[in-house]
Structure formats: structure tokens, C-alpha cells
Amino acid sequence: MRCVTSLLTAAAALTCLFILGGCGESATSVSSNGMTLQGTVVYDSGDQATQVTVHLFTANQDEQISQTLSSYPAVGFSPYSLMSFDPNTQEVVNTAQTDEDGLFQFEDLAAGTYVVDAVSPGYACAQPVLVTLEANSNAGTLQLSSVQETSGNLDAATWESGDVYLITGDLTVSPDVVLTIEPGVLVLLQGDFELKVYGGLQVLGSPSNPVRFRMESEESSSSGNWGGIRIEYATAECTIEGAVIQGASTAIRVKGADAQIGECLIDVPLTSVSYTHLRAHETSLHLV
């Protein structure tokens, strides 16, 4: 039986769904049914991605989660099965290689819903593709973006849609500096590091095009969690909208600052999934 709790705190108007790990069942099996799924992979430079590995995952079809979230009309993430996708924790059910034109193909697939993701050294796919397979289909084009490493003190910056960033050490947004993260950015963590905000933070994801935070790989994920987003005495506006935060020891901490947090999915060790919408006003808040 899946456990669900609705919580209202005095710190802020906070509605969370805590869906505890190990309580329910997901459909993950794939049987042969003769269908074909194909598509194309390109680099962010526009070049065709040859000899690139493409992974096929079964999308999360947990009916209890879907039914629970449907009871809360404020939950806007759609499709939910893509928002909860984490290649570090889900099993690859099939693998293909792209040809000289960047084309890939999976054969003998059963009808169902799948997530297609591509990997290549130094590159990552910021936006995996969700496909509902009912007949031979085309997944379209997956873009591999070059992974940009960052750490230390950050100057004012905008991370653009489709970009992939790898945080290799604690990353600090200094007072009077603003970091803007556009929809569709993938933020990877190499280890137990934090995003510390003393200036301003604008995470501008949306339910259909979120900003994703997760560990870099299964190996780094198994070695420990990352520290999450810490907002302390920020000198500028802080907004976190449409974010998917996975694998953090504490997803968001707010102390002595105003922060608007809306339509975020949080997948951390204490809870498999929680949905959050709140406003923290000059208070201490730990969101796990």
C-alpha cells in the first residue's frame, strides 16, 4: 500500500505529497510485440551524432502515484512519467547505436510508454523523449549538449534552454549576483556539493519543460547525495518554478530570505516523490 501525507506548516502555505519508496508497484516489463521505434540524435552544434548509445526505458506507470496526483489539480506536471524519470535509478530495457546519419532503431517492442535517452562522453541529453508506442513510431530528434563544468563563485549568468551543466564543487551565487536557469536545462552534480545562493536565483522551469537537478551518474549517485539548494540572506529575488530535484540530502533550504517555490517535484532519499508549492518569507525552511 502506498503511503500519502498532506502537510500544512506554519512556516509557509505548504502542500506536499510524500509518496514513500517501496510502497507500490510499477510496470517495468517489456515483451516482444513486433513494433519499431526509430529516431535521430544530433549534437548541439547541429552535427549528426554517429556511434552514440541510445537507451530505452519503460516509463513509470505507477497507477497509485497517478491517481494520487490527479486528486490535486494544482499539480501541473504532464506527463508525470517523464518528470519522474531518473536514468540513475531506472533499468535500461534496450540499447541501440546510431548509424553514420545519427539514426537509431529499436525493434520487436511491445505497445507501451517509453522514455528515450542518449549518452556520449562529454555530452548529455537535457530533454529525454517520452513516446507512447501503439504502432511503428518515430521518437523525433534527441539533442546531445556539451557538458559545461562549473564550481566556485559564479558571476551573473543565464543558463539557456537545452544546456547541460556539471557542478564539480560547491557553487556560490554571491550577493548582488543573479543566476537565471531557463526551462529545459539539466544540472548534474558530480558529488556532495551545494548550490549556495546569497544573491538571486531564478529557476524558470515549467510543468511541460522543467529544470532538472540530479546526480551525474549511477556511480556518483550510489556514493552519496548532493547537498541541494541553499538560499541564505539573499540580496535579490529567488524563485524556483517547475524544477525536478532528485537525489539531494535536503532539496531546498531557505534562511532569512524570501523565496517563491512552485510546482516542483522532489525525489530525495526520505521520500520517492513530493509535490511542493509554497512561499517562504524570511523564515527557516528545510524541504526534504
Image (cartoon, rainbow, N blue to C red):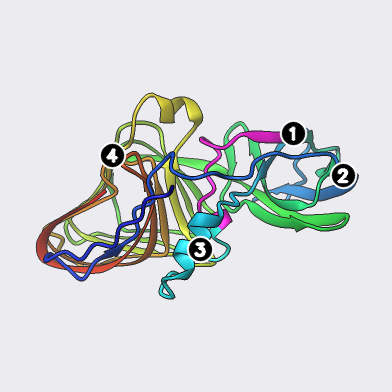
56, above or below 287, in the image: above
* Front position in the image: 24 or 187: 24
Place of residue 212 in the rendered image (x, y in percent of width and height, measured from the top left) = 46, 52
Name the kind of residue labelled 2 in the image: Asn
Name the kind of residue labelled 3 in the image: Gln
Query: Label 3: which residue?
Result: 67
Q: Is residue 7 left or right of residue 160?
A: left
- Name the magenta segment's main secondary structure: loop
Q: Is any atom of residue 206 visible in this view?
A: no
Mark 2 vs mark 1, foreground winner is: 2
Secondary structure, mark 4, is: loop
Q: Residue at x 12, y 64 (%)?
A: 11
* Front position in the image: 148 or 66: 66
First of labels 2, 3 by sequence position: 2
Q: Is residue 66 left or right of residue 134?
A: left
Query: Label 2: which residue?
Result: 33
Place of residue 159 in the rendered image (x, y in percent of width and height, measured from the top left) = 44, 57
